Image: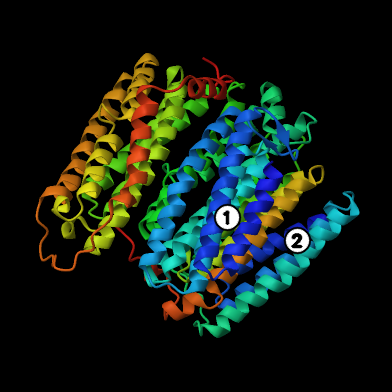
Amino acid sequence: MINILLIAFTISLIYIAMANRMLTYIRIIAFQGLLLFGIAFVELIEINVINLVFVLLETIIIKTIAIPFFLKFILDRNKITREAEPSVSNFISVVIVTLIILGSFFLTNAIRDTHLHKIFFIVALSALFTGLYIIITRRKILTHVMGFMVLENGVFVLSLAVGSEMPMLVNMGILLDIFVSVILLGIFADKIGDVFEEQDVEQLSNLKD
Amino acid sequence: MIGIYLAGSLLISLAFYFARNHLFNVILAWIFCILQGTLAIYEYAHPEETQLVYFTADSLAVIFLIVISIVCFPVIYHSFVYLSKHPYKPREMGMYYAATVMLIASISAAYLSNHMGITWVFVELTTLSASALIYHRRSKLTLEGSWKYIFICSISITLVFIGVLFATVAVQQQGINDLFYKTLSRNASMFNVFWMKLAFLFIFTGFTAKAGLVPMYTAGIDAKDKAPYPADALLASVLMNVGFIGIFRFYEITSHTSIFEWTNKIILISAILSVFVATVYMLRVKNIKRMMAYSGVEHMGIVMLGIAAGGIGYYAAILHLILHSLAKPALFFQFGQIYRIYGSKSVYDVGNYFKYNITGAIVLLLAYFIITAMPPSGMFVSEFLIFKSLFASGNLWILILVLILLTMIIWALGKNVFKMLFIKPVDFDDTRVESIPFSESISQIILLILVVYLGLNPPEELVTLINSAISTLPR
């Protein structure tokens, strides 16, 4: 069961690499939240009930509903163009993300450690690097935030791999989530659209020496 | 005490946010300063006492706590001066004070934390409150600055978290289930080397965003350029110590393992690159605030050189951090006055400063000598000891390289500072220059004198504290 969920998560990474519209990105992030809910449920079932409920509620409410909904709200409100405007063509993106997944597969297999949950590790690393890749190659500020969400989902998977014995770490990962949501609220809620007309990172290059 | 402190500062912060009355603000500020001072004194009087499970007053925390308590007074005083000169809305002023209090409180808690996870949480909180301060003026450029700061800091904090997870893998294999620094360093020699190396790399890279070292130093530069100057004084001094403490606590753990030599190499590389980058930028930067931000990168590089070299370098590095955190705020307060007179941060627009503000000019001149570590400055002593440790550890070529770079920095800074002090500015209308009262320079003079005194004649208590902070490291 858990393998199916993790593999579905990895496939969603490839899908995000070829997505063209902002709305697709948001949907994928919501879908990943749902998958993480399942993974957390199966993996953490043994920890105490209150903590488990907390983690599950967080994945479902914040990751799956609140953040995607909020991103959608920003998208509509600031009249951002629908296209994601990647600076690399989608075909190349898919190839690179596939290479990232293969790379993390080989990298993890090179680690000689019997205690390790290898599949968690592979998925987490692929999500981390895919997130970074999205941040590097997309031009919109909002897409950068989405890349960061993917990166964070990767971190969440990683924390699940070690967190079944130390639930505190999973809770810390959740804090990171809440932290980002607060920042999103603070900066994006109404400010960035008023100050900049077009939400392009090129606009953010006036501060230099 | 830490419980009272955290609850108290949260309440004060909330009260500031809703307060709309000047007198009430003054009273709140005094209460907070007293609370901060009491915390520092209490923790100094109760060394090694654990409170609320996750906070321990070890020597390093006490040192930095005393420093932040000293810096806190002038910061709040200058915040009042700064806000009284600008027509901000009451809501924005409330936000400013609330964020300042939260920043100071979360920095103090991050110092005192004895658990990897808790340190991480409070470092995250510093990013939140600092970004509220950077965004204070609500212009296009401040938005850009705070967005960059938030984004880089979020990625760095995620890297630290990944590092903590890797460390957990190593820890769990030994059947340990907590992340207290004490437990970790007691059992450090048993941990799997591979995971510890990975963990160190990630934690080090992540904390460099706060500490202002290569590779993530860029976050701090734009932030210090755009934040109001009293906030700069915090960002450029005590907040950098948070990054240092994060790195140092994990470094202490690795010092008991076989990867110690390897970590020293990593730190050395990052330190040299930091000094180098700072030199390159300081040679061409014309914005005085950015110049000082790069100077912070340079000083953190020097501190890390001392840590990597070992021996007397550990002592000197901590001393250098203390002195740097006291000297930097003085400079930033001074820049606030310069900005009020000339309305510009560019070296080209500032000049003949002696004519318009004599005390301010004297402070600037003194601060120049102190920040470049020329002999009356206490930093001369600490830098000298760091160079000595570099020499003793056989890094002669690195020492020569760093000395050449530092000479260039002294020249670059001197060129700009003397231009600001003595050469007439172009197109400057001096008919309506604001005269700045002497009283606003007193805090800077006190801070600078403290730097000289603590460096040349450190009190017995300080030396004991520093020595006990580094006592677990191999000699």
In-front residue for pair A108/A27: A27
Residue B180's spot in the image, x, y percent? 71, 34
Q: Residue B466: where, in percent of width, then height?
A: 51, 24
Residue A103 visible in rendering:
no
| Picture disc at residue A127 | none
For the point 47% across and 47% down, the residue is B73
- Pinpoint residue A11: horizontal percent, then vertical percent: 68, 63
Neighbour tally class for label 1: few under 14, some 14-19, many 20 plus, Cα within 10 Å = many
Q: Is the N terminus of chain A in the top left, top right, bottom left or bottom right quadrant?
A: bottom right
Q: What residue is disc 2 on?
A: A36
Secondary element under disc 1, as helix, strand or loop, is helix
Measure how far apart labels 2 and 1 are at the Cα level.
Answer: 33 Å
Q: Report the number of discs.
A: 2
Q: What's the residue at 36%, 28% (across, down)?
A: B453
Residue A158 to residue B141: above or below:
above
Disc 1 sits on a residue from what chain? B
Residue B289 in percent (x, y) is at 31, 53
B74 left or right of B169?
left
Q: Nearer the viewer, residue B196 or A119?
A: B196
What residue sits 85% from the left and 60% below the top? A53
Reading the image, the residue beneath label 1 is B102
Of labels 2 and 1, the one closer to you: 1
- For the C terminus of chain A, the image quarter is bottom left
Query: Up-down: is B271 above or below B420?
Result: above
Q: Residues within 10 Å of mark 2 (few under 14, many from 20)?
A: many
On the image, which quarter does residue B195 sit in? Answer: top right
Q: Secondary structure at mark 2?
A: helix
Specify the subunit that label 2 lies on: A
Is residue A167 visible in the rendered structure shown here? yes
Q: Identity of the amino acid at label 2?
A: Leu
Identify residue type, mark 1: Met
Q: Which residue corresponds to the image point at 39% horizontal and 18% vertical from the top-left? A: B389
